[in-house]
Amino acid sequence: MVAGVEFWFEFASTYSYLAAARIEALARSRDVAVAWRPFLLGPIFSAQGWTTSPFNIYEAKGRNMWRDMERLAQLYGLPFAKPSVFPQNGLKAARLALALPDGPRRAAFVKAVYAANFAHDEPIAEDAVLDGILHGLGEDVAALHAVAATPEIKDALRTNTATAIAKGVFGAPAVICADGELFWGNDRLEHALDWAARLDQGESSA
Amino acid sequence: MVAGVEFWFEFASTYSYLAAARIEALARSRDVAVAWRPFLLGPIFSAQGWTTSPFNIYEAKGRNMWRDMERLAQLYGLPFAKPSVFPQNGLKAARLALALPDGPRRAAFVKAVYAANFAHDEPIAEDAVLDGILHGLGEDVAALHAVAATPEIKDALRTNTATAIAKGVFGAPAVICADGELFWGNDRLEHALDWAARLDQGESSA
């Protein structure tokens, strides 16, 4: 049996960009399947009294994060450009991600939105940018927008955020293994996938 | 020429424990020298409006940190026990660290205090614990306490904290390379030392 992890991400999250770009290859090499789970950090941050990203609230922490992103992107060989607006509103993108079936089509869209935000400095809240991405991926733009606007998808995103909180998610990205073990951050991606792969071996030999 | 880094740490910091335990071997293998720089997070946190550790303020974040510490300690083969009091007051320990010359004696003391806090759950603010550590290391307990209580050492610790802030430190541990490049967290230890070692090569071949 193939092990599985849930990859919880928010489009405004810088380190989620790095993790989204890296997770497929790392998971494949460990025979781990990835479920792509968009959620919103806004309600989580609001509950902590934050009206914006903590990277904007705490200046030295924010300065370090941008420099760290530059260094890590270079290390990973990923394109990166500090966006002129941060954080960007990822609500529409998250609904569109949920309108796509989980799997390669959703993953491709998610990675393209992250690249738009953090490599090409494009406004991912705008239809023109999202439509361009969908079109480039060969998706039916009008049909997906229609699905993304349904109450079912809006509810699904609210439910995802509530589920994330219930599972202990407090930041993005987070990886949750089949046993409920939570790993926070791009820094824990390898650790989380190693954990998931070991779980699977335990199950197989039991 | 041997490259050098400054290792900035606070005794109450959980991830500083892991970094303090790991930095010497990682630095040695890269021919990088380590300067041990105690400072206090209290003034930094106060300036952000925090009266305790953010791991206590933000519950889900704190819960994840303790679990992460368990998992990382196991990965590194380090002993770990969640302390019954967190954070502990590291003021006296920091002054004693500064009373010892930077080098192996200070490093040994620092590592022993961290082990007392995060492996043996001992109250590191108490003289009995600190004296036991110093005695075990063959240090002159009374003489060191006398030095640690001088205005010079008290000033040195205040200056260290001010210097850390001026250099962009906002949390512990932090590693600062000779070019001023700052790396935050136990997670960046290898990256920081790789950076320092490359700097050194650049200088040698210039």
Image (cartoon, coloured by chain):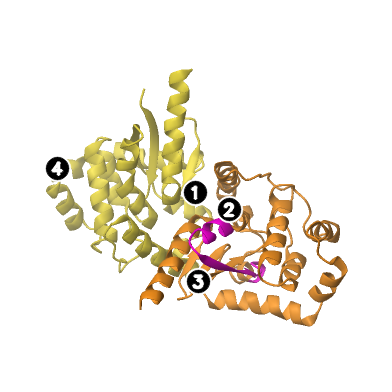
Chain colours: A orange, B yellow
Total marks placed: 4
Element class at badge 1: loop
Measured Cα–Cα span from mark 1 to mark 4: 32 Å
Instruction: Check the image and name the residue furthest to the top.
Output: B206
Between A100 and A176, the one lying in front of the other is A100
x and y percentages locating residue B93 in the rendered image: 27, 50
Q: Which chain carries label 2?
A: A
x and y percentages locating residue A8 in the rendered image: 59, 67
Q: Which of marks 2 and 3 is in front?
A: 3
Residue topped by disc 4: B139
Q: Residue at x 81, y 56 (%)?
A: A136
The answer to whether the residue labelled 3 contacts the one labelled 1, judged by CB atoms less than 8 Å apart, is no
Residue topped by disc 2: A58
Q: Is residue A41 magenta?
A: yes
The answer to whether the residue labelled 1 contacts the one labelled 2, judged by CB atoms less than 8 Å apart, is yes
For residue B170, the mark is 1
Residue topped by disc 3: A2
Give the residue type at disc 1. Phe
State whether discs 4 and 3 lie on one chain. Answer: no
Q: Which chain carries label 4?
A: B
